[in-house]
Image (spheres, rainbow, N blue to C red):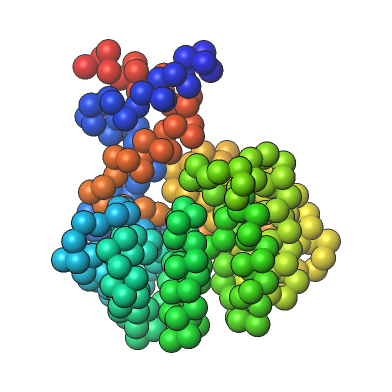
Amino acid sequence: MKLFNNLIAAILPYFPRFIIKPFAMPYVAGESLEKAVKRVLELNAAGYAVTMDILGEHVNTGEEAQAVTDAYCQLLETIHAEKVDGTISFKLTHVGLELGREMAEKNAMQITDKARELELGVTIDMENSPYTDATLDIFRQCFGRYKGVGTVLQAYFYRSPQDLAALAGLDLRVRICKGIYREAPEIAIQDRDEINGNFSRLIKSLANGAGYGEIATHDIGLIDELEIWLAENNIAKSEYEFQVLHGVPMGNRLEQLQAAGHKVRIYVPFGEAWFDYAVRRLKENPNMAGYILGNMFKR
């Protein structure tokens, strides 16, 4: 059955959207801002903080990049008006990085200035390796304008410990994740245990004084390991948080973290560009593939 589900998951992008949508939407907080706000307020009521992301990555024109930038500024306004316990996360390619460094800088600064005005947090997401240097450079510029800006380091990159060390001295907020993009073995660790080891070292470095650590993983074994280490080393709960993607099954582990007094933040994507994102999530959870196939034959 596992092999069958993996096979189905591999061909998911070719399925009609109406088949995938009912199973994809748990990973997405709706196609509209209104539905997303309703969902994040529900999460807040359950004790979770959130970070909201407008789905989409690459844009083709400056007008599209500006429209996305304006949408993020409106999102910040909405978070403030609705008193959401939350921040935003955005990708530089979504605000024009592929069209030019200057455009991405200008748009990132616009979002940063709006966040500073409203005193809300912003995370500049990390993308695949061609954008790493530019992302860190633009992060530094935005951080220089507003200390509420954070960024992301990916544990599978060999370079990430050096990147963290280069940011030393800043009052950092850094999300540590494993990394989802396919990268060459020359620059990215391929072994799961080695990635976990690098992940742990990055979090421990942040906890030992480099900044606020955002532990972004669904690996329950890794969560367990770090929870024990944080307690044994008397790391204040105000110095870190755990983060997971909306809709990814975690059993009751998030409730356990909450009960132990840890802050848990849910990464909540929304928007019309839900299909590609949801397919990636479904591929990561191939057991859902059988249900999707069954749904197809019921129609």
Q: Residue 258, percent across and down?
A: 61, 56
Left or right: where 258 falls relative to 9: right
Q: Residue, x 31% and y 30% (percent of image)? A: 13
Residue 238 in picture, x, y percent from top left: 64, 72
Q: Residue furthest right?
A: 232
Number of numbered discs visible in the structure rendering: 0
Residue 15 in sight here:
yes
Residue farthest front in this picture: 186
Q: Residue at x 79, y 58 (%)?
A: 229
Write down the quadrant of residue 40 in the picture. bottom left
The answer to whether residue 47 is visible is no
- The residue lying furthest to the left in this view is 63
| Above or below: residue 164 compared with residue 185 | below
Quadrant in which the C terminus is drawn? top left
Q: Is residue 132 above or below residue 191?
A: below
Q: Where's residue 236, x and y in %? A: 72, 71
Figure check: 220 above or below 51? above
Left or right? Give the position of 152 relative to 25: right
The percent coordinates of residue 177 (x first, y second) are: 57, 54
Rendered position, 56 above or below 10:
below
The front one of 136 and 43 is 136
Q: Residue at x 36, y 43 (%)?
A: 277
Residue at the (28%, 26%) spot, across then down: 14
